[in-house]
Amino acid sequence: MPLVSVSLGGGAARTCRATRQADGTLHLGLTGFAMVGVDATLLWTQNNRGCSIDGTVIAPPAGGLPGVYLRIDGVAGGIQRRRTERVRVQMPAVVLLPSGQLFPGRTVDLSAGGAHVTVDLEEMSEDSLMQLLEDLERDALIEVQIELPDGPVGLTCQVRAGGDEPGDVRLLFVNVNADVRERVARFVTASAATVAG
C-alpha cells in the first residue's frame, strides 16, 4: 500500500506508511499514542483513483512494531471491498472560510472521505481572493456544504492540497457523523454505478 493520509477520531490528518498484517489488520507507521476504539479514516491514491478505508484503532499485538494498529471494519482478511472510489461529479457547493466569508463553488469529484472542490472566482474582489488564498492553506479547517439529490450536507473539512488555480482545493472530511457519511457514501456508490453503466 502506498503512503496514506490518516485521520484518527476526526482529528488532523497525518501522512504515514500503512502495512497489512497477516491477520488482516493494518499497521500504521505513526508515532505517539492512539486510544483503542477510536475511529480512523485512511485516504490514498492508487492507479489515479482515490481510495479510502474506515477502521478502528485496536491494541498493538504482543511484540509488534511500534505504531498504531487498525481493524478494517466489516471486512475479513482484505481491504479491497472497503475501498471507496472517488467519482467525478459536479454538485453545487458552498465553502465557508474561518474568516466567515462564503464562496459558492462546485465539486470536481467526491468520495465518502473527501472531495475536490473549486470555488467560483468570477466577480470576486481582489480582497476576497486574497482572503480565500490565506484561508485555504494546507491543513486549515473549513466548512463546506454540498448539495446532494436528497438535500444539502454540511461537512467540516481539512485542506489537504491546492490545485493549479486559486480556489481549487482537495479536502478531507473530518468529524463526520455517521448519517452524513452514509448519505455521501450512498450518493458516491450510486454515481459510480451510473458512470460504470
Image (cartoon, grey):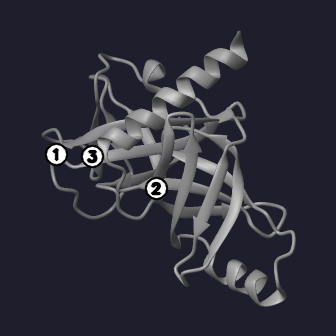
For mark 3, give the secondary structure. Answer: strand
Type of amino acid under label 1: Gly
Type of amino acid under label 2: Leu
> Is any part of residue 84 visible from this angle?
no
Q: Is residue 112 left or right of residue 31?
A: right
Label annotation for residue 37: 1
Q: Is residue 196 left or right of residue 9?
A: right
Quarter of the view holding residue 72: top left
For mark 2, give the secondary structure. Answer: strand
Kindly report the distance in space between the C-alpha atoms of the residues bearing marks 1 and 2: 23 Å
Q: Position of residue 179 (x, y in %)?
A: 33, 39
Q: Position of residue 129 (x, y in %)?
A: 77, 81
- Of marks 1 and 2, which one's residue comes earlier in the chain? 1
Pointer 3 and pointer 2: residues touching (CB < 8 Å)?
no
- Of marks 3 and 2, which one's residue comes earlier in the chain? 3
Label annotation for residue 155: 2
- Between 133 and 56, the one nearer to me in the picture: 133
Q: Which residue in the structure is indicated by mark 3?
A: 39
